[in-house]
Amino acid sequence: MGHKNNGTAVRSADLHAIVRIGEGIRGVVDTAREVNLAALNAMLSSRRGGDNAVGFRVASAELRGISTRLMEAMQGLTLLVSSMVNEVAQRQRKQRNQDYFRRVQDSQDRVGGRLSEILGKQEEEVDRLGMLLGQSRRDLHMKASRALRLCDQGLTLSRSALIEAAYGGESAPALKQVAEQLAQSIHSVAETLGGVRAELEEART
Amino acid sequence: MKKLETLFSEGTHQWQVIARDPERASALIDTNEYLIAHGNEAMLTDPGGLEIFPVVFSALAAGFDPRRVKWIFASHQDPDVISSLSLWLEFNPALRCYASRIWGSFLPHYGGDETTFIGLPDEGGKLPLGGIELDVVPAHYLHSSGNFHLYDAKARILFSGDVGAALPPPEEDELFVTDFDRHIRHAEGFHRRFMGSKAAVLDWCERAAVMDIDMLCPQHGSIYQGADVMRFINWFAELEVGSGLWATLPEMKKAA
Ligand SMILES: [Fe+2]
Ligand SMILES: [Fe+2]
C-alpha cells in the first residue's frame, strides 16, 4: 500500500505560497507603521524649521495619510488570505477523499454507480473550490496592485519631501535624514508588495 | 488484499470479518473489521483508519452490498478505529455511528455532524439490528475511558475491541488462535501497557465469564474460539496492567 499522492506537492505549494503572501502583508503593515511614525516625526521636526519648512510639513502629512491607507488596505488583504487558506484546505481535503475513493476496487461492480456518482460530486466540488480560489487570487492581485499605486504616490511624496528638506534652514540636515528614511521605507513596502504580486502571478500559471 | 470471511451464518443472520491485510503499509497497525447482518440491515464494527478505507471498502463490496450497512459501531475513539468515518459518510450520508457518549464532541473531528452520532450511556444497552438485538457491553478503561464491546447472544460472539488484541509476527498471523500459549505472548505487552486499571479488568472478566461466548473477536490479531475464550478471560484476570507507570514507579513492577 505504498500509494503516492501525485497532487500533494502541488497542493502544499499552494499553501506555502499563501503563507509567503501572508508574511509579505505582515511585513508591509510593519513598514507602513514605521512610515507613519517617521512621517509624524518629520512633521514635528519641520515645526522647528519654521515657515521655511512648510512644504516639507505638507509632504510629511500626506505621507502619513498614505501609510494609514496602506495599513487599511493590508487589513483587506489579510482577510482575503485567510479565506484562501480555508479554500485551499477544503480543496485539499476533497482531493484527498477523492484519492481514497479512486483506490477502491469494486470487483463486483455492485456499487459502481454510487461510486462514480461520489467521484463526480467530488470532482465538481474540487472544481468549484478551484474557481473560488482563482477568484480570491484575482481579488488579491487587484488589491495588491492598488496598494502598489499608493506606494508610487508615497515615493513621489517622499521625493518632494527630500527637495523641500533643503529649504529647512538650520533643520535641513535633520529633515533630509528623515526624508531619506521615509523614502527607504516606502521603497521596501513597494518591493514586498511587488513580490506578493509576482507570487500571485506565478501561482496563476 | 483484505478479504471477507464468514464466522457465523444462520439464514440472514451473519457475522463476517474483513480479515487482516498482509500487504498493508507496515507503519499502520493491522485491524479486523466485523460485519454483522440480520434481515436487510448491517452494522460494521470499528471500520478502521483513513489509509485503509480503500482496502476495507473493496473487500466489503466484493462480498456484500455496502449500501446495506446502516450503522457503524465504534468501540472507542482511536484513529485505527474510526478515522475513516468521513469517507464512509461520503459513501452513505445517512449512516449513523454508535459510540460512547463521552466522545460526542471528539468524534466529529473525524467528520459527521450532530445527526451522525448516537451516544451510548456508560451502562451500555441494546441495539436493534434488522429484527434482533445486540448487547452493548461496558468495557471502560480497557483501554479507552469510554469503551464498549458488542455481544450477539444468538450468534454467541463477542466483539471485544482492543481487549484480546495481539500483534503476532507475520508467520504466526492466523485468523483463529491455534496455540493459546504461543499466541498470548504477542498479546501480553500490549495488554500490560494499554490497559490501565486492574479494577476495570476484573469487572470486565466477571461480566465476560458469565456470557455464553463461542468466539471472542478482537480488533487486532487472531480470534479466540471454544476453550480459548475462557483461557483468555482467566489469563487477563491474572495479568498486572498499567505498565506505563513502572517507568516512574518501579516498586509497582515488583508488585506485579
Ligand atoms: Fe485503541
Ligand atoms: Fe485498536
Image (tube, rainbow, N blue to C red):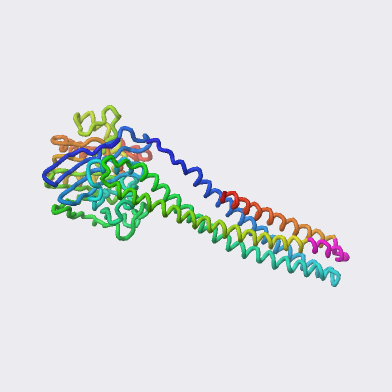
Total count of labels: 0
Rendering quarter of residue A27:
bottom right
Q: Residue at x 27, y 49 (%)?
A: B74
Residue A190 % position (x, y): 69, 56
Q: Is residue A175 visible?
A: yes
Q: Is residue B210 visible?
A: no
Asked whether A43 or A24 is in front, the reply is: A24
Q: Determine the main secondary structure of the stretch shown in magenta.
A: helix
A115 drawn magenta = no
Residue A37 % position (x, y): 71, 63
Q: Quadrant of ligand 1?
A: top left
Rendering quarter of residue B193:
top left
Q: Residue at x 60, y 57 (%)?
A: A141
Asked whether A83 or A6 is in front, the reply is: A6
Residue B135 % position (x, y): 17, 51
Q: In the rendered structure, which segment of residues is drawn in magenta?
A: A159-172
Q: In the picture provided, is B126 more to the left or to the right than B111?
A: left
Asked whether A84 or B108 is in front, the reply is: A84
Q: Is residue B182 above or below residue A204?
A: above
Q: Is residue B213 above or below residue A145?
A: above
Asked whether A80 or A123 is in front, the reply is: A123
